[in-house]
Image (tube, rainbow, N blue to C red):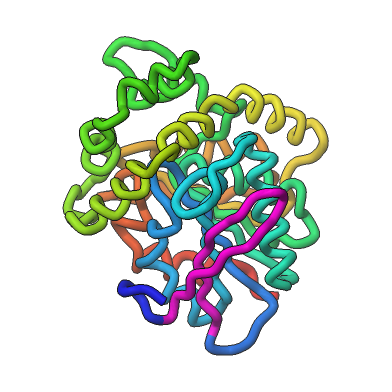
Amino acid sequence: MNSWNERIEHHRAHVNDVQLHYLLARSTTPVDEAVVLLHGWPQTSYAWRKVIPGLSARYDVVAPDLRGLGDSQRRGPYDKTTLARDVAELVEQLGHRRIHVVAHDMGATVGYALAHQEQQRVASLVVLEMLLPGFGLEEAASLREGGTTFWHLAFHLAEGGHAEALTQGREATYLHRFYTDSLYDPTSLTAEDRAHYLRAYEAPGAMHAGFEWYRTLFDDARDNRRRVQERLLDIPVLAIGGAHRMGDRVRESLAQVARSVQGETWEHCGHYPHEEQPERLVTRLLEFCPES
């Protein structure tokens, strides 16, 4: 158990040749249906602490530390097809017949791959603040007048370990922007929250694993384009963008890979809807996720 919610359990599972740490909150009514929460970078499963209690009133809730990050094993490969397979095997072990996938940032690339490959199990997909590789992310990171908020993609992709060398011992300095400038209201993350994330990314190998997530982006883009050629998602998809970050571009990206996409742009919200407006997110998810 942990200090921030006594109903949230910590577990470990060996799946797809890697050990994952995950959070589990059981619904008060036994169900074989779950909400699966997939964090982005630079966060961990801790990112969902504000929404898990509300969601677990109806569903089991599963929130893994994705491969390489948090308390999960740092072991490649880090392409999102592999990470999606990790999550699929975890859900299979837990025995959930039907899942609703909610994914943020880079975790959304995992979520899309999971929804595509597990079409019999995934009932809905919600994407928070992400443009998919192959469908908008590369263009958003391109050079243009006035600069780009996606400059870090090219930095993370640099070969030769340059990103690791330049951030080693300076993790707090480097990650400050992601935990401050990317929020509409920087106080949405407390000093304790920031310290939690920093401890996770100061751990040996954590920054390298995160950079490796990015170094597969062109492989991920090719995989995504292949998936679209095979079929569009035919499940309900909700795309949420912060008005002060990605906005409607989230919907535009997802509309290229799915038949039915609802798009919402939230005012007074930056890159972390789950941190900045958790109560609104819980309400919206419980409205959106189709009943079995």
- Is residue 8 magenta-colored? yes
The majority secondary structure of the magenta stretch comes to strand
Q: Which residue in the rendered view is the most extreme toward the bottom? A: 29
Give how far across and how far down residue 89 sits, in percent: 72, 58
Q: Residue at left 71%, top 30%?
A: 223
Question: Is 35 or 13 nearer to us in this picture?
Answer: 13
| Nearer the observer, 5 or 98 | 5
Q: With respect to residue 64, does 143 lie above or below?
A: above
Q: Residue furthest front?
A: 204
Q: Where is residue 289 in the image (x, y as percent from the top left)?
A: 59, 67
Q: What stretch is highlighted in magenta?
A: 7-27
State the image coordinates of residue 5 (x, y, percent, origin top left): 36, 76
| Location of residue 181 by image quarter | top left
Q: Is residue 186 left or right of residue 203?
A: left
Residue ID at (49%, 82%):
57
Q: Residue at x 46, y 45 (%)?
A: 40
Image quarter where the N terminus lies is bottom left
If the image is split into quadrants, where does the C terminus sit? Answer: bottom right
Q: Judge left or right: residue 21 versus residue 199.
A: right
The picture places residue 80, in percent across and down from the top left corner, at: 63, 39
Residue at point 23%, 38% (across, down): 172
Q: In which quarter of the image is residue 151?
A: top left
Total marks placed: 0
Taking depth in this image into account, of 151 and 279 the one nearest to the observer is 151
In the depicted structure, whether residue 140 falls above or below residue 105: above
**168 to the left or right of 216:** left
Which residue is more in the foreground, 112 or 207?
207
> Is 174 a magenta residue?
no
